[in-house]
Image (spheres, rainbow, N blue to C red):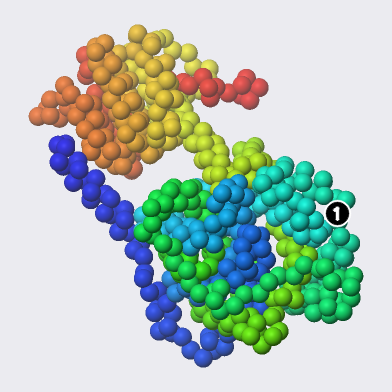
C-alpha cells in the first residue's frame, strides 16, 4: 500500500469514526412534536420538587467550593435550563454537585496564589471545562467511559465525602477563624488544624448543627417523601437566624451568609486579550480537564441508571455535549462548574417527570428564586442573611454521609481483587493527592489492571482425532519431536499482549526440529500495529533460518488488518499465485477446521513430504494439575 493510499484510508476511517451517531443540535424539537398538556402538568410538578431541593443544595455546594453562594444558585438554574435542550436523557438534571465543588475547592486550596483571583478565574475555568466536554463529544470520547470501572467512582465519591465532612466540621464547630488556610489545604493538614482548634469550639454552633442534623434525619425517616433538605434549612434559618440571633445575646455571634444583589449576578466574562491569559490557561488546564472528565462520567452513569427505569437508551456522546453546553452557559452567566446531580435527577424521576422539559422548567423556577433572593435585599429582608453557616454545614455533612454507599463498597471489595485494589487506591488518592489528580490516578489503575488481564493470550494444545476433528489434546499423549507445530492462539492481540505473544511463539521456535509453524488465529482478536509488527518479525526470523510460518483460521477482521498494514505481502512471499499457493487461510464459519487442514497440507508441501510428524504445541502455563485430571 502506498503512503498516499494509506493516508487516504486513514482519513476515511476517521470520517466514519466521527460520522457515526451524529450529535443533534436541537433534540428538544423532537420532544416538542409530541408534547401535550398532560406531560406539561407532570413536568411542572416535578420541576417544583426539584427546585425546592436544587436551590438550597446550590448554596451548600458553593459553600463547599469556597465560593460566594450566588455562583451556586446561578449554576443550578442555568445548567438545568440549558442541558435539557441538548441531552438525550429526560430525567437528568445538571447543576453544582458535591464532587465537582470539592474538586474546585481542592485546587484553589493548593494554589493560594490563584485563590485570591478565584472570582476572576472562575469563568475561564468553567469555559475551559465546557469546551473540553464539547470537543470530547464531537470526537465521541464518551464511548470510552464504559471502560472506567465503577470501583473508581465508588472510591472517589467515598473519599470526597470524607473530605467534605472534614471541611465542613470547622463551620459546624465554630472554629473556622482558627484554621490556617494554607496548612489545611491537605487532608492531613486539615485534621491537624482541627485537632489544634478543639479548645475554641463554640457550643452555640454545635447546638445548631446537632439540631439541624437531627431534624434532617427525622424528616427523612418519618416523612421520606417531603423535601427534607429544604424544610430543614428553612426551619433552621427561621429559628436560629431570624429569631434567636437578633433576640438572644447567646446567639448574637452566630455566623450567617451574606446575600447577593443584582450587581453580583451580572455576567462577568474573562478578559481573553490580556498578557497573562496563556499563563492562566496553563495553570487551570489540569483542573478544567479533571472537572470535565468527572462531570461527563457522573452524567453518563446517572443517565444509564435512570434509563434502566424507563427502558430508554441514552446517547453518551449527546449527554456529554449537553454537559459542555451547560458549563459554557454557566460560565457566561457567572456560575460554577455543572455536573449531573444524583439527588435532583433521582427526585426528578421519582416524582413523575415525563420529558426533558421538567429540567427546563426547574431552571426557569431557579432563575425566579435567584431574582427573588436578590430583590429581597431591596425590600430590607435579605433572605440569605438568615441562613446560619453552622446549619448549612451540618446539612452538607448529613448529605455527605449518604455518599457512603455501603452496599456498593462491599460489592467492590468482595467481587475481585482488582476491584478492591482500584477502590482502595482511588479512595486513598482522594485523601492524599489533589482531587483533579486523584480521579485520573483511579482511572489509570483501573485501566492498567484491565490491560494486565486482557493482555494474556495463551496457547492451547490441539490435535486431529481419528475422526478428523480438531480437538484439545489429551495430557497422556506422548509424541516425538515433530516437524510441524500447530499453535492455537486464544485472546486479545493488541499492543499490551504483543510482547507476551512474541515470547510464547519464541518458545516454540526455539525447537530446531520444527520447520513449519501453523499459527491458528481463529480466536485471536483486536490485532493492532504492535502485534502485527511482532508477527512480521517472527515471519522474517523464521524465513532467515529456512523455516516457514502459515496463518490459518484468520477471521475477516484479522485478514483486513494484515492486508492494510502490508504484512500480508510478507507472509505471502515465495508463494506462486498462479498455482494457487498461499500461506494464509481464512477461517470458514461452516467448517472451522477446514482452514487448519488446508494449512497442514501446505506445510507438508513446503516440507516435500506427505507423512510429516505433527506436533500440537501445549502451553505449560495452562497445564492441569494431576489432582484435577
Residue 347, x across and y down, in percent: 64, 73
Give the quarter of the figure containing the C terminus.
top right
Residue 472, x across and y down, in percent: 46, 28
Question: In this orientation, which residue lies closer to the viewer: 367 or 135?
Answer: 367
Residue 417 shows up from this direction:
yes
Residue 406, x across and y down, in percent: 73, 53
Which residue shows up at 75% across the image and 70% down it?
256
Q: Residues within 10 Å of mark 1 (few under 14, many from 20)?
A: some
Question: In this orientation, which residue lies closer to the viewer: 589 or 163?
Answer: 163
Residue 467 occupies quadrant: top left
Give the quarter of the figure containing the N terminus.
top left
Horizontal arrangement in the rendering, residue 129 relative to residue 104 (left or right):
left
Horizontal arrangement in the rendering, residue 320 relative to residue 55 (left or right):
left
Residue 359 shows up from this direction:
no
Which residue shows up at 59% across the image and 78% down it?
261
- In the depicted structure, whether residue 467 falls above or below residue 56: above
Which residue shows up at 62% across the image and 19% down it?
626
Judging by the rendered image, the residue that carries numbered circle 1 is: 200
Horizontal arrangement in the rendering, residue 534 relative to residue 570 (left or right):
right
Residue 535, x across and y down, in percent: 32, 26
Question: Farthest residue in the left direction?
Answer: 578
Residue 274 occupies quadrant: bottom left
Residue 606 occupies quadrant: top left
Question: In this orientation, which residue lies closer to the viewer: 473 or 251?
Answer: 251
Which residue shows up at 69% across the image and 76% down it?
384
- In the depicted structure, whether residue 113 falls above or below residue 266: above
Horizontal arrangement in the rendering, residue 114 relative to residue 570 (left or right):
right
Q: Secondary structure at mark 1?
A: helix
Amino acid at each position: 500500500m502506498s503512503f498516499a493510499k494509506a493516508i487516504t484510508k486513514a482519513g476515511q476511517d476517521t470520517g466514519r469514526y466521527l460520522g457515526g451517531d451524529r450529535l443533534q443540535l436541537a433534540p428538544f424539537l423532537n420532544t416538542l412534536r409530541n408534547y401535550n398538556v398532560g406531560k406539561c402538568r407532570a413536568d411542572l410538578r416535578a420541576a417544583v420538587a426539584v427546585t425546592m431541593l436544587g436551590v438550597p443544595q446550590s448554596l451548600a455546594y458553593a459553600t463547599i467550593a469556597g465560593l460566594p453562594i450566588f455562583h451556586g444558585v446561578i449554576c443550578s438554574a442555568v445548567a438545568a435550563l440549558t442541558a435539557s435542550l441538548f441531552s438525550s436523557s429526560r430525567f437528568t438534571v445538571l447543576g453544582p454537585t458535591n464532587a465537582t465543588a470539592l474538586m474546585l475547592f481542592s485546587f484553589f486550596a493548593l494554589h493560594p496564589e490563584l485563590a485570591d483571583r478565584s472570582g476572576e478565574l472562575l469563568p475561564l475555568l468553567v469555559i475551559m471545562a465546557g469546551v473540553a466536554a464539547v470537543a470530547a463529544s464531537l470526537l465521541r470520547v464518551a464511548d470510552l467511559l464504559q471502560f472506567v470501572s465503577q470501583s473508581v467512582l465508588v472510591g472517589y465519591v467515598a473519599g470526597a465525602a470524607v473530605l467534605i465532612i472534614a471541611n465542613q466540621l470547622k463551620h459546624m464547630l465554630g472554629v473556622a477563624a482558627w484554621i490556617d488556610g494554607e496548612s489545611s489545604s491537605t487532608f492531613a493538614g486539615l485534621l491537624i488544624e482541627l485537632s489544634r482548634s478543639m479548645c475554641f469550639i463554640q457550643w452555640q454552633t454545635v447546638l445548631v448543627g446537632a439540631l439541624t442534623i437531627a431534624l434532617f434525619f427525622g424528616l427523612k425517616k418519618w416523612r421520606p417523601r417531603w423535601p427534607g433538605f429544604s424544610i430543614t434549612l428553612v426551619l433552621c434559618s427561621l429559628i436560629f437566624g431570624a429569631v434567636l440571633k437578633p433576640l438572644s445575646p447567646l446567639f448574637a455571634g452566630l455566623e450567617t451568609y451574606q446575600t447577593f444583589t443584582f450587581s453580583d449576578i451580572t455576567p462577568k466574562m474573562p478578559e481573553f486579550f490580556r498578557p497573562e491569559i496563556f499563563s492562566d490557561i496553563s495553570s487551570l488546564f489540569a483542573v478544567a480537564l479533571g472537572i470535565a472528565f468527572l462531570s461527563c462520567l457522573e452524567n453518563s452513569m446517572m443517565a444509564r441508571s435512570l434509563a434502566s427505569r424507563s427502558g430508554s437508551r441514552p446517547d453518551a456522546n449527546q449527554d456529554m455535549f449537553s454537559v459542555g453546553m451547560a458549563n459554557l452557559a454557566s460560565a457566561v452567566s457567572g456560575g460554577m462548574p455543572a455536573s449531573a446531580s444524583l439527588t435532583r435527577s433521582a427526585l426528578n424521576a421519582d416524582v413523575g417527570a415525563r420529558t426533558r422539559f421538567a429540567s427546563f422548567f426547574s431552571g426557569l423556577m431557579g432563575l425566579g428564586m435567584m431574582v427573588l433572593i436578590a430583590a429581597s435585599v431591596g425590600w430590607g429582608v435579605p433572605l440569605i442573611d438568615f441562613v446560619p453557616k453552622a446549619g448549612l454545614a451540618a446539612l452538607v455533612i448529613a448529605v455527605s454521609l449518604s455518599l457512603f454507599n455501603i452496599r456498593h463498597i462491599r460489592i467492590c471489595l468482595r467481587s475481585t481483587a482488582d476491584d478492591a485494589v482500584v477502590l482502595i487506591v482511588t479512595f486513598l488518592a482522594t485523601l492524599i493527592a489533589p482531587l483533579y489528580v486523584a480521579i485520573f490516578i483511579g482511572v489509570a489503575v483501573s485501566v492498567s489492571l484491565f490491560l494486565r488481564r486482557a493482555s494474556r493470550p495463551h496457547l492451547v494444545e490441539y490435535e486431529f482425532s481419528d475422526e478428523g476433528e480438531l480437538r484439545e489434546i489429551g495430557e497422556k499423549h506422548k509424541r516425538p519431536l515433530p516437524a510441524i507445530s500447530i499453535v492455537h492462539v486464544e485472546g486479545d492481540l493488541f499492543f499490551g499482549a504483543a510482547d507476551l505473544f512474541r515470547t510464547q511463539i519464541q518458545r516454540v521456535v526455539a525447537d530446531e526440529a520444527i520447520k513449519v509453524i501453523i499459527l491458528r488465529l481463529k480466536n485471536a482478536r483486536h490485532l493492532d500495529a504492535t502485534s502485527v509488527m511482532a508477527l512480521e518479525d517472527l515471519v522474517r526470523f523464521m524465513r532467515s533460518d529456512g523455516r516457514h510460518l502459515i496463518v490459518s483460521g484468520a477471521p475477516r477482521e484479522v485478514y483486513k488488518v494484515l492486508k492494510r498494514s502490508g504484512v500480508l505481502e510478507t507472509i505471502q512471499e515465495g508463494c506462486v499465485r498462479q498455482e494457487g499457493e498461499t500461506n494464509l487461510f481464512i477461517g470458514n464459519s461452516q467448517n472451522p477446521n477446514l482452514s487448519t487442514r488446508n494449512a497442514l497440507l501446505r506445510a507438508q508441501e513446503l516440507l516435500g513430504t506427505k507423512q510429516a510428524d505433527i506436533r500440537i504445541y501445549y502451553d505449560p502455563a495452562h497445564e492441569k494439575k494431576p489432582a484435577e485430571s
